[in-house]
Image (spheres, coloured by chain):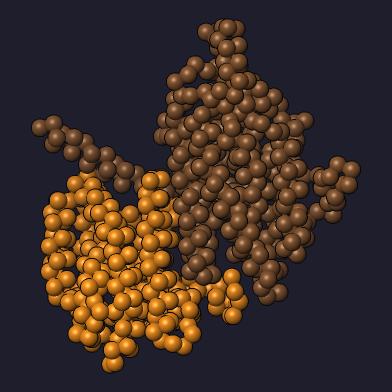
Chain colours: A brown, B orange
Amino acid sequence: MYTQGLDQAGKDRRVAAETEELLNAFQKRVDAEEKIEAKDWMPEAYRRTLIRQISQHAHSEIIGMQPEGNWLTRAPSLKRKAILLAKVQDEAGHGLYLYSAAETLGVSRDQMVADLLSGKAKYSSIFNYPTLSWADIGAIGWLVDGAAIMNQIPLCRCSYGPYARAMVRVCKEESFHQRQGFDIMHSLCLGTAAQKAMAQDALDRWWWPSLMMFGPNDSESTHSAQSMAWKIKRFSNDELRQKFVDVTVQQADFLGLSVPDDELRFDDETGHYQFGEINWQELFDVIAGNGPCNKQRLEKRQRAHTDGAWVREAAQAYASKQAARAAA
Amino acid sequence: MSNDAAVLAYTLRLADNALILAQCMVELVTAEPELEEELANANFALDYIGQARMLYTYAGELEGKGRSEDDFAFMRDEHEFANLLLLEQPNGHFGDALVRQFLFDAFYVHLLDAITRCSDERLREIAARAVKEVRYHLRHCSQWLVRLGDGTELSHNRVQTSLDYAWRYTGEMFAGDEIDQAINADIDGPDLEAIHGLWRKDVESVVAEATLSLPDDSWMASGGKQGRHTEQLGFLLAEMQYLQRSFPGATW
Ligand SMILES: [Fe+2]
Ligand SMILES: [Fe+2]
């Protein structure tokens, strides 16, 4: 989802000092559902997996501010403007907690930001799609925050304490976002024909990218087993995706919108909705940098960083002067 | 001008100030120099939007024609907006936006404080809430002005230029017209001359701490309060109002 299982396998080999004894003791703690804290011993691969996952998650929060920020100046009422601004502000806050959680693992925020700006670090593919109408703000809250919640609720029980605790706070806010997004869609669907068409168009464009947020099929997701054993991940990509579809299709029905999938049908035997094949090539293209907005999103972040350099330098220079004055 | 008409016009001025500043700040979302400033900028803009909403709602009640907060914000034209020219000036760089907010907040905090003692109960209530918010904004802006002024040579020079430019829009804050006079006389509202003195003292002290120099009071722009604006406002409103104007009568 926000982390999307984009990790490359193979880099996380065991390091020499990690004796069988240490590894077993660690696994025992995890199996007993004990929380691993920053100062505790942990396998290097566990640490690196978490750094990658948490920093990707943080970057997604930050980049995710852009598609929604795109409608802040044009929000159709003062109330909607305030709600959207509060949401975008929450996402900045999520980025901040998550960077802090990742820092407990021994990586600096500066390094993580540098990796984002250089294009080395990934963020969720979903934020590389454009927001073309006001209804997209509704669709993002409803679908994207909705999908994020599916992934993040189990992360509240993640074996790594600082991440789990950050997620508890984040999840509360994400569920507000989801309800606010749904409320925008609901208002549009109760509105004029043009408004309802706007809502349908948004669902048509955001449905499949939302399903892609859960990452590749389980059969393709080589990295999952270890994350499951470490209790970083609790459910597989396909399990979470199915859960999302089951909940969301009913909400679309309630709104009177149609989900853009001809193969979608309820299976009485399994009690789940069956849905069509995801266009995986599109997901891989977007991850590879060829989504509709990859270039703009990254450039905007780079520009803000570059334009702000003189301000950060001034703050630093002032702080050093103050420290020197205090010492004198 | 009747007492009620003056209170209505004055309430709209206050609301327009808050909304137009908020709209400019909203443009800055995702462009701040660091993440902590993203949070602060959004937080402050939210406060101003909240103030604008309370004030427009009160204006609608005073007017008694059934206009809502959104009717005032989205369905009025440029010449009907009575915000200060300072607040519609383009964001420019971090220092420009900072100076704009600093100069305004240093005025607004005293204005609101005076309104908390006026005889209009609703304005008193709104001001009592807003003054706490704005006091905090002003502290934040003052700290940044000092950091930039007393930071690097580059930041010092940049923010001095921002201050020199914005200064021409400060005269309007204290140039009272018949509405300001009516508010002062009829509802014991702010005395602009007294506020000018307080503002000047506060601004001088922060500017001095920032090692910057206070610009000369030379030519001052005016007209915002009377609906004569700079070119920026038309674009700002066109963007802000577009959905309401494209879909008249729709609810969102
Ligand atoms: Fe978030
Ligand atoms: Fe969210």
Q: How many marks?
A: 0
**Horizontal and vertical percent for residue A29?**
57, 18
Give the quarter of the figure containing the N terminus of chain B.
bottom left
Residue A121 in view here: no
Q: Residue at x 76, y 53 (%)?
A: A249
Give the quarter of the figure containing the C terminus of chain B.
bottom right
Q: Nearer the viewer, residue A85 or A5?
A: A85
Q: Residue at x 23, y 68 (%)?
A: B113
Question: For residue B250, what is the image quadrant?
Answer: bottom right
Q: Is residue A89 above or below residue B57?
A: above
**Horizontal and vertical percent for residue A16?**
55, 8
Q: Residue furthest left?
A: A328
Q: Nearer the viewer, residue A77 or B175?
A: A77
**Horizontal and vertical percent for residue A285?**
68, 42
Q: Residue furthest right?
A: A269
Report whether A247 appears left or right of B66: right
Q: Residue furthest bottom?
A: B1
Question: For residue A204, what is the image quadrant?
Answer: bottom right
**Horizontal and vertical percent for residue B217?**
14, 70
Q: Residue at x 18, y 38 (%)?
A: A321
Residue B144 in view here: yes
Q: Is residue A38 above or below residue B27?
A: above
Report whether A33 appears left or right of B74: right
Report whether A102 appears left or right of A235: left
Q: Residue at x 66, y 52 (%)?
A: A143
Report whether A6 appears left or right of B152: right
